[in-house]
Image (spheres, grey):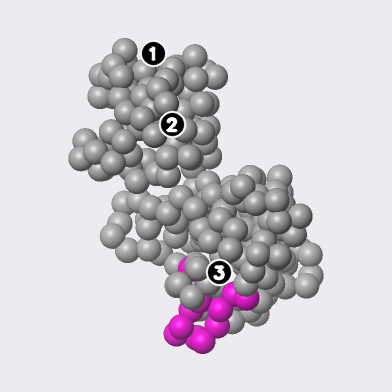
Amino acid sequence: MSLKSTGPEATLLPSNKTSASNSLTYPYLYNFPPFFELQPVQQTRSAQLAAWSAFIQSYCRHHRLFALTPIDALPTPLFTNAAISHALRLKDARAVLSWMASKEGGHRAEWINSSNSKKSGGGEEDGGAARCWIFWRTPEEWAGLLEEWVERTGQKGSVVTLYEITESDATKREEFWGMDAELLMRCLQVCVKRGKAQVFGSEGSEGVKFF
């Protein structure tokens, strides 16, 4: 079976229905064993990596996952298709995530605070225990969404805590609900650089004022 695309990867990517549906749409390649084996031919491999990137982003968006630890994610349906008894190997999962973190992969992932991961492309020395941000929205996109939420809810000039943004009932329907505090702070810093917000307070009790 060929993994090459005949158009702009249209036949390889899962349809983007996860935000409007209760069920996750899997790519059709998920049911073919070669999808779980990184291909040696560069053109085919590039298309395969793009397909994996799109699927991982859709999966994480559907399940509200902002980060992955490869070794923990390996036995989940993300990397293992029990129906066909095939799974992505740990080193290949790391390779996919490292490709996502590259310029070619659109910087849709980033290894978190791990010098080993940076050296080995995904934690070869730590057995895959390194965590990786999955940017189904980039920090810049999240910043824009936060700014839109502030505008929509009339909170310009108000002070809100980080807890209120990601954990309160008022934001439970927002995509950023449940976001890791570290990632949220990074997104807020984008707002700060744009002159749209000011963050203050000590670690663990930060507040933010939007302009």
Q: Residue at 24% of width from left, 38% of height from top?
A: 168
Q: Foreground: 104 or 193?
A: 193
Q: Quadrant of the C terminus?
A: top left
Q: Residue at 60% of width from left, 58% of height from top?
A: 130
Q: Residue at 46% of width from left, 83% of height from top?
A: 82
> According to the image, label 1 marks what residue?
211
Numbered disc in front, either 3 or 1: 3
- Which quadrant of the structure image shows residue 87? bottom right
Q: Earlier in the sequence, mark 3 or mark 2?
A: 3
Q: Point out which mark residue 58 bears.
A: none
> According to the image, label 2 marks what residue?
203
Q: Secondary structure at mark 1?
A: loop
Q: Secondary structure at mark 2?
A: loop
Q: Earlier in the sequence, mark 3 or mark 1?
A: 3
Numbered disc in front, either 1 or 2: 2
> According to the image, label 3 marks what residue?
71
Magenta residues (range): 78-89
Neighbor class of circle 2 (other Cα within 10 Å; few <14, some 14-19, many 20+) is few
Q: CA distance from mark 3 to mark 1?
A: 42 Å
Residue 11: in magenta span: no
Residue 61, given in percent of the width and then of the height, sits at: 42, 52
How many numbered marks have been drawn onto this rendered protein structure? 3
